[in-house]
Amino acid sequence: MIKDKILVYSDYIIHENSGGPPGYLYKCVLDNHPKEIVLLDDALKINKIKFKVKLRHKLFKLLGFFSKKLTNKNTSKFIYSNSLNYKFIYFHDVFTLYNVLHLIKKEQIIILQSHSPQLPSEEKFDFSKNQKELIHSKLIEKLAFERANVLVFPNKECVITYKSLILKKHTIKYLLTGIKKIESSVFYPIKKNKINLLYIGRRNDIKGFNFLIKTFKEVTATRDDLCLFIAGSGALINGKNIYDLGLITTPYNWINSVDFVFSLNEKSYFDLNVIETICLGTPLIMTTTEGHNFFKNTRGIIDVTNKNLVDVLLSKNLINKKYKIENKKAILSLYNHFFTESIFKENLQTICREIIQQFN
């Protein structure tokens, strides 16, 4: 059994504009992992060379005659990637872990890093509104956390969200998110005489979207120099000075072009789009709940609550065209001090070495 490497297992399609765990793997881990980490794609390539005849794959197809559970796509990938020969396997969501739970050996050490700002079952219910699915999802997250040996969070403030699932046996590690440098020299020709605001992401309550729309409409009844751009899928939003972009393929150019970006989570984990915005030197108007408490009292970040958002947006001394110019250097400095790819890689390597040492 391989005891000095950690296999990062995933069954996602990973690309540049992915969100959630796939986005994290693409933007944080793909190009920034230390030698202690083996990505699933690399394990599959190695295994293809080692097992040209694909005997294992054929064997499990044959077993499918007796058990469909053994032949789903996740099981085939798990077996074929040689995952059973790694002592350490790193999962980035409870559902992927659950899909192969029946195959994992007792002696294997499972590392779990969930990326949801709420319990995974609650997040899934927000999408489906299916009560039976909620009950099943609660069972999945319970079993996944019970099997995990190590839990990884961005910081201590994120732990509270998962408090009900954390057991005494769990080892907890902290890994601050970091990304490779983002470059954008594009400035879209949006109205220069307006203060341009941007919201990117899911259009639900936990992200503060509905509250933002309600508040913005209230503010624009008094203040006419604000424009709100919305990016992401969902029902078309109409309103005074509101521009719904729908799904976009150039988020960095939009972040680079506007004066402020919103992050109004009711509950916060550690959003990638916040770090991407910081990397581009654009100010944020954000709530600093849970994991985002990290950004409290930080220059270039305007801390808001549901109670004061109206007052903040109405303040021309704060929300103006000069704010980005005056604070851009400070925001870029924040990225360089905490969120670069080299810092992330070093931190990831540290926790990997600690885990390998602890369980060997």
Image (cartoon, rainbow, N blue to C red):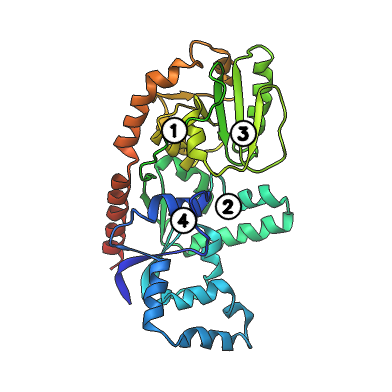
The crowd level at tag 3 (other Cα within 10 Å; few <14, some 14-19, many 20+) is many
Residue 95 or residue 197, whichever sits in front = 197
Which residue is at a point 69% across and 14% down the rendered structure image?
221
Quarter where residue 31 is shown = bottom left
| For residue 84, side relative to residue 212 (left or right) | left
Distance from the alpha carbon under mark 3 to that under mark 4: 40 Å
Type of amino acid under label 2: Pro
**Residue pictured at 72% horizontal, 40% vertical:** 235
**x, y (%) of residue 278?**
41, 33
Q: Give the quadrant of the C terminus.
A: bottom left
Q: Amino acid at mark 4?
A: Leu
Residue picked out by circle 2? 120
Dot 4: what SS? Answer: loop
- The quadrant of the rendering that contains the N terminus is bottom left
Query: In the displayed structure, would residue 217 be above or below residue 97?
Result: above
Q: Residues within 10 Å of mark 1 (few under 14, many from 20)?
A: some
**Label 1 sits on what residue type?**
Asn
Q: Label 3 to label 2, Cα distance in Å?
A: 25 Å
Please report whichever mark, 1 or 2, sits nearer to the chain's N-terminal start. 2
Q: Look at discs 4 and 1 and give the one toward the viewer.
A: 1
Residue position marked by numbered label 1 in the rendering: 293
Q: What is the spatial separation of the Cα atoms under label 4 and label 2, in whole angstroms?
A: 17 Å
**Residue 167 tag number:** 4
Label 3 or label 4, whichever lies nearer to me, is 3
The percent position of residue 357, horizontal first and vertical second, equals: 26, 63
Mark 3 lies on residue: 230
